[in-house]
Image: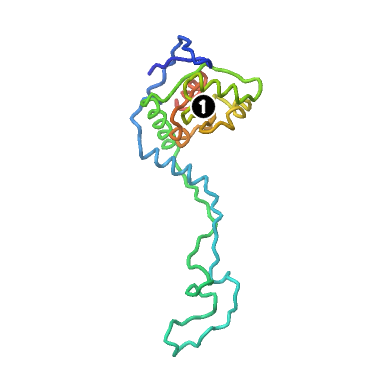
């Protein structure tokens, strides 16, 4: 697939970039996408939830009623789960939700996400640019020139750039990611993906294996 390269003024430079069919043109695998997004979301969970069980509730351990003859359950102390204020049966405990996912599955999922974006014409390529200082106004100018002000955007940079990140940080519905930090969730979460020319080369280098 060939895409035109635009400058930060939104003008066509006349150059073309060819997106690799092995990355941007595969038949998307929905199950791989599901697994990769599931792992990403699971890894975001803190897993600090906790409720008190019977032995952890503060309360008297005196036996409330006699064992037999009451006509009811054999209730022990006031911490019984059967009573209001008692402990919880099999309540949540702190734990990690992380799980393993094979590298090939993750790679397939990310290629599938990029292929979906390419298939839907949701990828724009811009020439490489730099910011001399954090400037939200300049970043807003770029997305306005590209006619993407009203879209949920993901800009992918070849490497970390503090000034670009800070310039986009306060803009709603806009994220900046590096090629190394690219994942299925952030690609699919964006309506449009903006790649720089070096980003395209870096993505192809990362997924060539």
Give the residue at mark 1. Answer: 155
Density class for disc 1 (Cα within 10 Å; few <14, some 14-19, many ≥20) is: many
Residue at point 65%, 20% (across, down): 132
Asked if residue 89 is positioned above or below residue 205 in the image, the reply reads below
Q: Quadrant of the N terminus?
A: top left
Tell me where residue 168 appears, x and y as whole percent: 58, 29
Q: Quadrant of the C terminus?
A: top left
Tell me where residue 142 appears, x and y as whole percent: 54, 20
Asked if residue 161 is positioned above or below residue 83 in the image, the reply reads above
**Foreground: 99 or 177?**
177
Residue at point 54%, 29% (across, down): 178
**Foreground: 26 or 168?**
168
Q: Which residue lies furthest to the top in this view?
A: 14
Q: Which residue lies furthest to the right in this view?
A: 133
Tell me where residue 93 appears, x and y as whole percent: 53, 59
**Foreground: 10 or 43?**
10
Asked if residue 130 is positioned above or below residue 78 in the image, the reply reads above
Q: Which residue lies furthest to the left in this view?
A: 27
The secondary element bearing badge 1 is classed as strand
Residue at point 46%, 29% (across, down): 151
């Amino acid at each position: 697939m060939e895409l035109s390269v635009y400058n930060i003024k939104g003008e066509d430079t006349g150059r073309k970039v060819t997106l690799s069919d092995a990355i941007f043109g595969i038949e998307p695998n929905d199950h791989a996408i599901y697994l990769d997004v599931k792992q990403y979301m699971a890894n975001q969970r803190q897993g600090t939830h906790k409720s008190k069980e019977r032995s952890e509730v503060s309360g008297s351990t005196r036996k409330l009623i006699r064992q037999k003859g009451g006509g009811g359950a054999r209730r022990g102390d006031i911490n019984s789960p059967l009573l209001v204020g008692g402990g919880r049966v099999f309540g949540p405990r702190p734990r990690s939700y992380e799980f393993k996912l094979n590298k090939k599955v993750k790679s397939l999922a990310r290629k599938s996400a990029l292929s979906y974006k390419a298939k839907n014409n949701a990828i724009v390529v811009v020439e490489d640019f730099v910011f001399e200082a954090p400037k939200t106004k300049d970043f807003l100018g770029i997305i306005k020139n590209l006619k993407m002000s009203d879209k949920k955007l993901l800009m992918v940079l070849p490497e970390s750039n503090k000034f670009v990140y800070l310039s986009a940080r306060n803009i709603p519905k806009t994220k900046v990611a590096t090629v190394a930090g690219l994942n299925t969730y952030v690609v699919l979460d964006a309506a449009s993906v903006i790649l720089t020319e070096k980003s395209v080369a870096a993505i192809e280098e990362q997924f060539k294996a």
